[in-house]
Image (tube, helix red, strand yellow):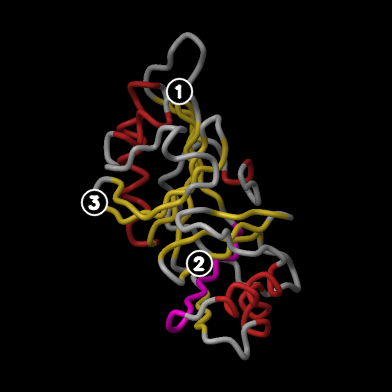
Amino acid sequence: MVERRSALEGAARPGDFGTPAAGGPGVILGERRSLAIVQVAALGERDAAVRGGIAAGCGVAPAAEASRAARGGGTAVLWSGPGRWLVVAAEQPGSDLAARLEAALATAPAVVTDLGHARTVLRVSGPSARDLLAKGCPLDLHLRTFPVDACAHSLLGHAGTLIHAVDAVPSFDLYLARSYARSAWEWIEESAAEYGCRVVAPADLTGSG
């Protein structure tokens, strides 16, 4: 397992910022680190074998519906487009998620790509999380229309982002290209100031999903 340097090194400083309401900060912000992130893309329209291979390789079958995530045993399989999924799990010594998926999909029409070095994952939660994201995201993230385990590609400010509704707190995981991570982080901190923003250390979010 190769140790990765965070794109937010030096920018993510734990502490409270802005003006929180009487009940405490409205937004909790942190980076999820030590994650294995693997993209699986089916070739052509026959993806039944690919779905089966993903289930065999990570223990979680993709959700039957589009724009949904499936989770189990600390692993999440996120729909990221037609015939395309992100498989996400905490990194484990001696365990290579990409290699397991490649082996399970060896005879399936699919391409497996390790994106662990190319993505930054932010966790945004708290009572004002939806209001915050609405400032820069065109999606309707209300629980009625974007329930727990909904996931979709959209924009956050100017950055393309895969958004996953983790729970009803609400909490959202934001998957961004590494090159956009710092600007997205700065946008969130600034935009969350009116609600009060608590930045937590990465260790508080490692493997949480």
Which is more N-terminal, label 3 or label 2? 2
For the residues carrying marks 2 and 3, which lies nearer the camera in this image? 2
Q: x, y (%) of residue 183?
A: 30, 49
In the image, residue 142 sits, relative to residue 174, either above or below, namely: above
The residue type indicated by label 1 comes to: Gly
10 Å neighbourhood of mark 1: few (<14), some, or many (≥20)? Answer: many
Is 77 a magenta residue? no
Could you say which disc has been placed on residue 76 in the image? none
Q: Secondary structure at mark 1?
A: loop
In the image, residue 146 sits, relative to residue 93, either above or below, namely: above
Q: Which residues are magenta?
A: 34-45
Outermost residue, top side: 22
Q: Residue at x 57, y 37 (%)?
A: 167
Q: Which residue is mark 1?
A: 26
SS assignment for the magenta stretch, majority: strand
Badges 2 and 1: C-beta atoms under 8 Å apart?
no
Q: x, y (%) of residue 155?
A: 29, 50
113 to the left or right of 97: left
Which is more N-terminal, label 1 or label 2? 1
Q: CA distance from mark 2 to mark 1?
A: 31 Å
Task: Please tell me in which quadrant of the rendered image residue 132 appears.
Answer: top left
The residue type indicated by label 2 comes to: Trp
10 Å neighbourhood of mark 3: few (<14), some, or many (≥20)? Answer: few
For the residues carrying marks 2 and 1, which lies nearer the camera in this image? 2
Residue in the foreground of this view, choosing between 108 and 186: 108
Q: Which residue is mark 3?
A: 158
Q: Secondary structure at mark 3?
A: loop
Q: From the image, which quarter does the N terminus lie in? A: bottom right
Q: CA distance from mark 2 to mark 3?
A: 23 Å
Q: Which residue is mark 2?
A: 85
